[in-house]
Amino acid sequence: AQSVAQPEDQVNVAEGNPLTVKCTYSVSGNPYLFWYVQYPNRGLQFLLKYITGDNLVKGSYGFEAEFNKSQTSFHLKKPSALVSDSALYFCAVRLYSGYSTLTFGKGTMLLVSP
Amino acid sequence: GAVVSQHPSRVICKSGTSVKIECRSLDFQATTMFWYRQFPKQSLMLMATSNEGSKATYEQGVEKDKFLINHASLTLSTLTVTSAHPEDSSFYICSARDSQSNQPQHFGDGTRLSIL
């Protein structure tokens, strides 16, 4: 079984400040890890993924995430938040091989204040 | 980047009506498509997985006779909500993945279904 935990329902940050959205995962095998963003009444947009290689993954819109195998974490980060980053963020995991399905975290609402 | 097109974006109809939602992968062949349901302020709930040319695999608790899925080609999957009732009102999102297993799933923009 695989699972994803996003411990924060909401993260508040001021524009220009760094942001972190936390994610930990559990999977029996090598994980594929993903971050998606959802704006109101829209589907999910892919931000970045980790498969293998460098633990620091860079993605769209200046976001990056760090894979930490020992802590089974994949936190999303951005050095300087924008008001337009305000949205719902989902972390997801699936097994490295085969056609396993994505398992999503419950989502974290990011609110960036001007 | 890969694009998944989902139509319609919003449906409002009377109870008892059947509603069809289309999901198309525009620039890649989607060997596998997924249908999700999302309740307000909640995560996505996987309803079913469909592979081109074969029957869909439904998650536990999802009525296959209620939610008919057809994956007729490598670029098109449809979800039909049969005899819809108010409790079927929700946000439905499709997703597609191509044959390379290390590629991310791409999502449509969702369909807001409101049953009166």
Image (cartoon, coloured by chain):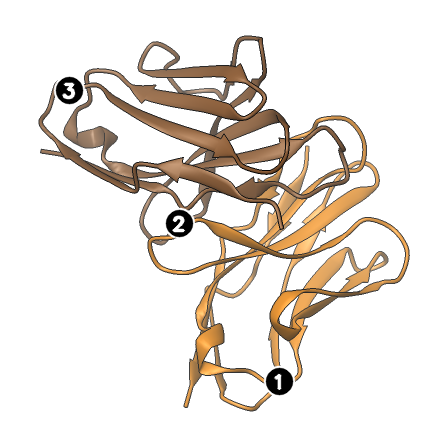
| Residue name at image x 89 percent, y 62 percent | A54
**Which quarter of the image is occupied by the C terminus of chain B?**
top left
Structural distance between the alpha carbons of marks 3 and 1: 49 Å
What is the chain identity of the residue bearing mark 1?
Answer: A
Nearest-to-viewer mark from 3 and 1: 3
- Residue at the spot of label 2: B42
Q: Where B1 falls versus A68 (above or below)?
A: above
Near-viewer residue (A55 or B98) = B98
- Residue at the spot of label 3: B17
Q: Secondary structure at mark 3?
A: loop
Q: Where B9 falls versus B49 (above or below)?
A: below
What is the chain identity of the residue bearing mark 3?
Answer: B
Label 1 packing within 10 angstroms: few (<14), some (14-19), many (20+): few
Q: Secondary structure at mark 2?
A: loop
Chain seen in orange: A
| Residue name at image x 15 percent, y 31 percent | B86
> What colour denotes chain B?
brown
Near-viewer residue (A41 or A95) = A41
Q: Name the amino acid, label 3.
A: Thr
- Residue at the spot of label 1: A18
Label 2 packing within 10 angstroms: few (<14), some (14-19), many (20+): few
Near-viewer residue (B27 or B6) = B27
On the image, the x and y values in percent for residue A25 come to 69, 50
| Residue name at image x 33 percent, y 53 percent | A41
Q: Secondary structure at mark 1?
A: loop
Q: Is residue A94 left or right of residue B94?
A: right
Q: Name the amino acid, label 2.
A: Gln
Q: Where A107 falls versus B27 (above or below)?
A: below
Structural distance between the alpha carbons of marks 2 and 1: 26 Å
Structural distance between the alpha carbons of marks 3 and 2: 26 Å
On the image, the x and y values in percent for residue B48 come to 49, 23
